[in-house]
Image: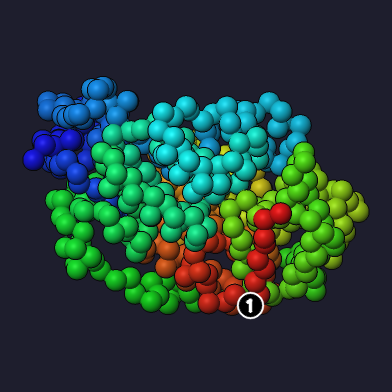
Amino acid sequence: MQDIISITDGVARNPVYRMKKPINLHIGKGEHIAIVGPNGGGKSLLVDTITGRYPLLMNEVAYDFSPSESEMVCDNVKYITFRDSYGDSDATYYYQQRWNTHDIDETPIVRDLLPACADGELKDALYDLFGVEAMLDKHIILLSSGELRKFQLTKTLLSGPRVLIMDNPFIGLDAKTRDLLHVLLRRLTEMTRLQVILVLSKTDDIPEFITHVIPVEDRTCGDKISLQEYLHQRREVPAHVLPEEKRERILNLPYGENLYHAEHIVDLNKVSIRYGDRTILKDLDWTVRCGEKWALSGDNGSGKSTLLSLVCADNPQSYACDIALFGRKRGSGESIWEIKKHIGYVSPEMHRAYLKNLPAIDIVASGLHDSIGLYRKMQEKDRAVCEWWMDIFGIADLKDRNFLQLSSGEQRMVLLARAFVKDPELLILDEPLHGLDMWNRRLVKDVIEAFCERKDKTMIMVTHYQEELPAVITNALYLKRN
């Protein structure tokens, strides 16, 4: 059988990017691969080697893209990485940019970023699947994280790759779109020569068109096995993985001083948000009372993240709305930072904006001051608190590692510790389990559940997966697209 991609005893020239053992990998014509493994196990390192990003010592990666007209890797292999799924991150992007209307005109619109496609049938199928027509005239900065994923998938598939590599393609998509993407990818593999490689942290939704699995763990590339063999030997994650000792530590955590003790945490009265001629939220009334745990859901682009940006005081339009937080009316004299001191927050926008290559413990410590990056010297008592939460999340050994050298899943765990580090009264978790492996997903749910058992803790959580919701949920709000 023709090997479309082949690596024999592959060792990266740069020791920083080496796996623990030489890579031996052969992907045959017609095979569709899932690369699976724990966070930090080396999945992205393997893919970067496959795509030629890291040159090898002796035996370079061998490609055979026939019958493709081009032999160039860049023409035949397209890779949608974790950060790509949140948009094209660069130094010009900043955390609140999506909510600031004065920056919108300087960003391109979707129509201008999509390539031409000779295959009209493929274009129509993609536009229909992802609702692209409705996005064409929107500025890229206004897309939700789910819409950005749809845009990136459309842009990449329109280019007609021979091999499509996707990092966790289903996260951030609503249930209907996930199901349709499964169907579309299967159809494309049946109707075209496209071969698919999926990099998956969440391994309970491997599509049925996948033929083989390559496990990667402890920076070691395992043998390629059939999907059936992998499913047969896959280990189940226990119902709970947080050690009881750590759960008790969370439950017995002393309460801080200067708490608000408000009966109403969030009050929105007839709130409407518009960007240009598009209405995101219309006449929304919503009250969150102390101790409630809300599940916030809705299709991609329905306004979930916009709603949370109002609560977190990140959206300038919030000051034109009738909003009260912790019983204090917005605009009545309180500072943004006074409000933020009582809120712990993690979101796709935050992860996208965090391009700070600081030690992981400094990233966690920035949560104490609500900054993107750490701009003041860490005190010893702050360091102890950061180490305490990093231990709870099982990432104590990452504290001195630079953030941008961590895997996307490890980065997400660091940002979660950042959200909890000040023991907030209001916890806002916008798709917190993105990119986490099955063990860490269960661990984070355990931490959330233990944290929310404490007195007067309030939570708002966004997810597109019902099984991600912790057992403590008491209320639900579903947003519909306008």
The residue at 88%/51% (across/down) is: 331
Query: Where's residue 99, x and y in %?
Result: 71, 42
Is 44 placed left or right of 224 in the picture? right
Query: Where's residue 32, x and y in %?
Result: 24, 48
| Residue that mark 1 sits on | 474
Instruction: Determine if residue 7 is in view.
Output: yes
- Mark 1 lies on a secondary structure that is loop
The residue at 49%/49% (across/down) is: 129
Q: Nearer the viewer, residue 343 or 255?
A: 343
Q: Quadrant of residue 339?
A: bottom right
Position of residue 408 relative to residue 281, above or below, is above
The residue at 84%/66% (across/down) is: 327
In this view, the residue farthest toward the left is 1
Query: Where's residue 202, x and y in %?
Result: 37, 59
The kind of residue on which mark 1 rests is Thr
Q: Quadrant of residue 38?
A: bottom left
Position of residue 292 relative to residue 382, above or below, is below
Position of residue 355 relative to residue 250, above or below, is above
Query: Where's residue 441, x and y in %?
Result: 43, 63
